[in-house]
Image (tube, rainbow, N blue to C red):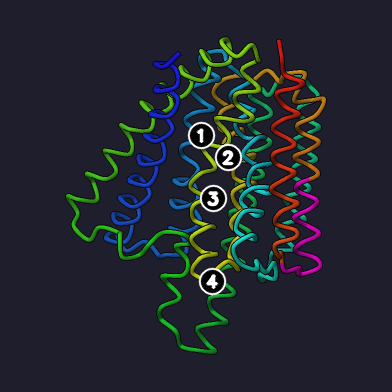
Amino acid sequence: MFIAYLSLVGGLAALIFAGDFLVRGSVGIAKMLGIPSLVIGLTIVAFGTSAPELVISLNAALQGNGGIAIGNVVGSNIANVLLVMGLPALLAPTPCDEKGATRNAVFMVGVSLIFIGLCFHGILDFWTGVVLVSMLAGFLLWSAHTAHQHRKTMKAATGNRDLELEELGDVDVESIPENALLSFGYVFIGLVGLPIGAHYTVEGAVVLASAWGVSDAVIGLTVVALGTSLPELATTLMAAVRQHAAVALGNVIGSNLFNILAILGITSLIAPIPVPEQILEMDIWVMLGCAILLLIFAMRRMCLGRGLGLLLTAGYISYIYGVFALGKI
């Protein structure tokens, strides 16, 4: 059992660090090649920060552990709303008034509904992947157009050349390597570390599921999902501490969209993912409820205080309890 715990924790840690190295190295190379920050932010950074979830789901699907593959995404989306939005609100008020958040939240609810419909086929197969990846391509093109128009407007109004840096999202600009050799070294570490981390994470999760008497879906929905949501949680907590929590809503919406469209889309193109009965009965509906909750926050331009933060955090704890209560084999 100790080895299983060590494998799970060590694998998750390797995923987080490897994903971070991959993003920073890739951004460094892209900047040297003269690729605009807008393109880097919408592609390299967006995909790179989702790399841990992608390699876990892909590795699990290829090993026949579909519960971990889909549970990782559904559980992460739930944790992103209840925990990643809830805990920072306990530290500092979290405004939900970002420009374009309502439009993206509406799209996220629509994607969630389509995803639920696809789940009731019982298996996410190649054609499911085609649908999800096509929607991802459309979303990226739409986002690129919207961001480009916004950037032109802002530059015309302010003449601010530093807007380039804002388009990199959560990446710490000062940590991007400027040396080509160092950038390629970061990418190499990321590409090697991600599959190794995914292997040990899935291996540890499967052993623990058996030892705890629960399905692999339960482990995917809870332990693995929470582990892969740690980067988003840490980023949002630090933003709250530094009084910059206004970006939390947009980050969560973007992460949840990528989880469904990119991670499950790409994974199902490569390997079929059976949908566990428990996820159909409860978890996808909790995920949909969380998506609608985000839409309400965005539409009403709410500011989350300690009261709402406490409710969201308590809701996540209750959800975890319910998952284990219903997931006993």
Quarter holding residue 286: top right
Element on which disc 2 rests: helix
Is residue 249 among what the camera can see? no
Which of the labelled discs sits on residue 206, or is there none?
Answer: none
Q: What stretch is highlighted in magenta?
A: 290-303
Question: Three-letter amino acid code at disc 3?
Answer: Leu
Quarter holding residue 134: top right
Which residue position holds label 4?
243
Q: Which label sits in the foreground, 3 or 1?
A: 3
Residue shown at the point (48%, 60%) measured from the top left: 238
Which of the labelled discs sits on residue 262, or is there none?
Answer: 2
Residue shown at the point (58%, 57%) measured from the top left: 251
Q: Which label sits in the foreground, 1 or 4?
A: 4
Comes first in the chain, label 2 or label 1: 1
At label 3, counting other C-alpha atoms closer than 10 Å, the crowd grade (few under 14, some 14-19, many 20 or more) is many
Comes first in the chain, label 4 or label 2: 4
Residue shown at the point (53%, 16%) measured from the top left: 208
Element on which disc 1 rests: helix
Determine whether label 3 and label 2 are within 8 Å by CB: no
Residue 75: percent from the left, percent from the top? 65, 35
Question: Three-letter amino acid code at disc 4?
Answer: Gln
Which residue position holds label 1?
54
Comes first in the chain, label 3 or label 4: 3
Which of the labelled discs sits on residue 233, or is there none?
Answer: 3
Residue 162: percent from the left, percent from the top? 41, 78
Residue shown at the point (58%, 15%) measured from the top left: 209
At label 4, counting other C-alpha atoms closer than 10 Å, the crowd grade (few under 14, some 14-19, many 20 or more) is few
Quarter holding residue 316: top right
Q: Does the magenta stretch include residue 147?
A: no
Mark 4–mark 2 distance (CA, rounded to whole Å) = 31 Å
